[in-house]
Image: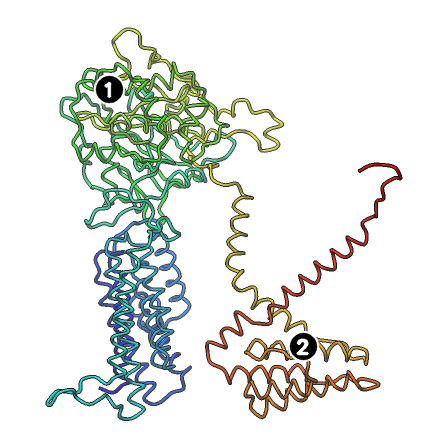
Amino acid sequence: MSGQARLVLWAWGATMMAACALLPLVDPAFWIIQAAIMLAVQSGVGAAARRIPLARPLTVAAQALTGLVLLTLAFCRQQAVAGLIPGPEAFRHFAELLRQGGDDIARYAIPAPLESDGIRLMLVGGVLVIGLLVDTLAVTFRSAAPAGLPLLALYSVAAGLSDGGADWLWFLIAAAGYLMLLLAEGRDRLSQWGRVFGGAPRFPGESRGAVTPVRTGRRIGAFALGLALVVPLALPAMDGGLLDPAGTGVGSGNGRGGTISAVNPLVSLRDSLNVDEDRQVLSVRTDSSDISNLYLRIVSLDDFDGSTWKPSKRQITAVPEGPFPTPVGLGPDIERAQTETTISAADWYAQDWLPMPYPPSGVRVDGNWRYEPVGMTLVGDHGQNTRGLTYEVRSLDVQPTAEQLASAPRPPEALLREYTELPESLPAVVSRTAREVTEGAANSYERAVRLQEYFAVNGRFQYDTEVWVGSGKQAIARFLRDKRGFCVHFSFAMAAMARSLDIPARVAVGFAPGSPQADGSVSVGLRDAHAWPELYFEGVGWTRFEPTPTRGSIPSYTVEDTPGTNVPDPALPSRGTTTEPSAAPSVSEGCTPQQKKLDACPSESAAAVPVTKDDGPRWYAALAWALGGLAVLLLPLAPMLWRVRIRSVRLGAHGRAEGDAVPHVLAVWEELTDTAWDFGVPPDASRTPRGAAARIVRLGRLDPTAEAAAHRVADAVEQVLYAPRPRPAAGLAEDVHRVRAGLRASVSGKSRLRARFAPRSAIRVTWMLSARWSALEQRLSSARPTLRKPSGQRG
């Protein structure tokens, strides 16, 4: 095999080995076979074009066109001209697939389903683009070392998105491919030198083996690869970066159907609900005679990191065609009733999750929806949302008794461990307050009821939507201290305190019961946006509690039959709901006309937004950090930037009058001497311009062109210094550039790098600042008045 063919093969192999890092991101991984075949065809076209031979740009263009045709055949054959040539319709389809892929990347967690053509296009197309770059650099332009940059980019994207379990293995594979590419290029270069002496055999009959440069290259490559694998183990880990996976979550699952990432749904809820007027969001019709329990649940938040709650990364599947499975933990002896609910969403309400009563037992809905079994929720797929949607939900109205909840057995250990997990950063006051409030309670049910009473009745908490939500480590502690907040504060705090008491807990987000209308429907408005805790009891399942005062309804099963309970009568509606029919949405309470005019009315929908203002640094602190980081990045480049600026000023435009000749020529001469200084020839002020130029030529080993340019600048300097009437000289700036080019050609690469990034002449900045400081001190000392003591006065 020829050296060029070997180099083409290893360019293809290095790209595919680096692409292996993408394998954990998608399930199944059949896409890599398609990418390997298409990349092989693209590389083969490049090899054929170089053999003709074509010019380098034409070779790259031929490969790029081949890749585009292959992608057209694979992804948009129907939109292409004659099924092969990509036209405007094909490019529009490519754009739509890429948009779809971007949505899927944001929606799914690892591993994403391969059934998405958008994700598959991104994977295969990305491999073809990286392969084209590697082949162009390593084979077409014979420079394999820079080809490591696109390979590194491919690996970095994969490593940044993966869960990190086997990153070292994918790095090892990618690095091995890159090193073999370097070795193949080295062998190809050596083969062009003719036969290379490899050293005589050390013993009679011993084979010579690899030539010395190749053997040395292998040793260096093995050492560098080992060092790259070992060194990171000794360095502190850096988590939470820009490419860190969204949450660590649980239950990612390995089954078909993909997973849904831990994207906080409250962000989209905020976008849809955070307006000032109480607009109708949903119109609900139900066959239930009691709407006080008609909470429409969107999603549950079960991942608590100490700052905020968010949904875990969960496996999603197709929506079951028949009845949904029985909710986890719900036993056969618990009374329940089947209800039918028809829900119509407003044309402006675009929610990715489907609001439903919990627990649902079946749903009839049009569009692309997926089912998340753990939370029993539906999430839109490929941009599907609730805008203008009407759907029917069958659900269970679970009616446990207080005795059944009080006698609930201990939950399974796996569920208990998952839903009672608390971060070490949680302030101790949270668990301490939970123990104080529930002191003397006999079981988990009594503890849960006492927590609810503490927040809703006897803890002197006040419902206030103007309180900042906050998301820092001290948010819950501050809420327990100030005792002011809205549903986010109450639900987050109660769920965290329940977990500290070993009661499995999570937070549900959705809508509280709306207002009955004259036509028999129920209007759910913005002000009904709500969050509430759900606690788990074995035999009953996930059970709703209502700690937020004046919001929602107190569940009947939380009213103990024992004397002394302060829980309000659940039959009484809470403030904010009404049993009277309403033909129009109500206006915000306490909002004056002047506030409405200024758009300053508080929005109840903020109850569904956990992060309207966090406890992190303010904008000016963030700006200061950003400027500080920028300064740190620019500081090492300051000498280079200063020299570039000074060179531009010295060699820039100047006046054409005779009076402008002297400053311009002297500035050009100073730039010439500083340039020589940067390349290791320090200035010598004792010499004449002609002697200084000769010294620069001699020490800088300048070629004849640069030598003549240096002497022309020196002659111009002598002319302006000694001629009675100095005249402007043309072309001096170009002469300085010629001298600079000659100096660069005569020094090593290390010296060229130092001349660019650490120029010696940058010391003039220090001298300039020192001179200005001395001048300032002299001016201050001369301006200071002399004070004389009056005669006869003692010191």
Residue kind at label 1, given as amino acid type: Tyr
| Dot in front, 2 or 1 | 2
Q: Nearer the viewer, residue 414 or 708?
A: 708
Q: Residue at x 28, y 21 (%)?
A: 448
Total tally of numbered discs in the picture: 2
**Label 2, label 1: how far apart the Cα atoms are:** 86 Å
As helix, strand or loop, the secondary structure at mark 1 comes to helix
> Which image quarter is the N terminus in?
bottom left
Residue kind at label 2, given as amino acid type: Glu
Question: What is the x, y in percent for residue 573?
Answer: 38, 16
Q: Which residue is mark 2?
A: 670
As helix, strand or loop, the secondary structure at mark 2 comes to helix
Q: Nearer the viewer, residue 453 or 580?
A: 453
Question: In the image, is 547 to the left or to the right of 617?
Answer: left
Question: What is the x, y in percent for residue 741?
Answer: 56, 83
Residue 456, compared with residue 761, is above or below; it is above
**Residue furthest out toward the left:** 205
Q: Nearer the viewer, residue 621 or 6?
A: 621
Q: In the figure, residue 86 lies in which quadrant?
A: bottom left
Q: In the figure, residue 513 lies in which quadrant?
A: top left
Question: What is the x, y in percent for residue 599?
Answer: 58, 33
> Which image quarter is the C terminus in?
top right
Q: Residue at x 28, y 22 (%)?
A: 288
Question: In the image, is 118 to the left or to the right of 628?
Answer: left
Q: Nearer the viewer, residue 304 or 508?
A: 304
In the rendered structure, find residue 445 and report the number of the disc placed on it. 1
Q: Give the mark, 2 or 1, whose residue is nearer the N terminus.
A: 1
Q: Residue at x 69, y 84 (%)?
A: 689
**Residue furthest out toward the top:** 563
Question: What is the x, y in percent for residue 127?
Answer: 31, 67
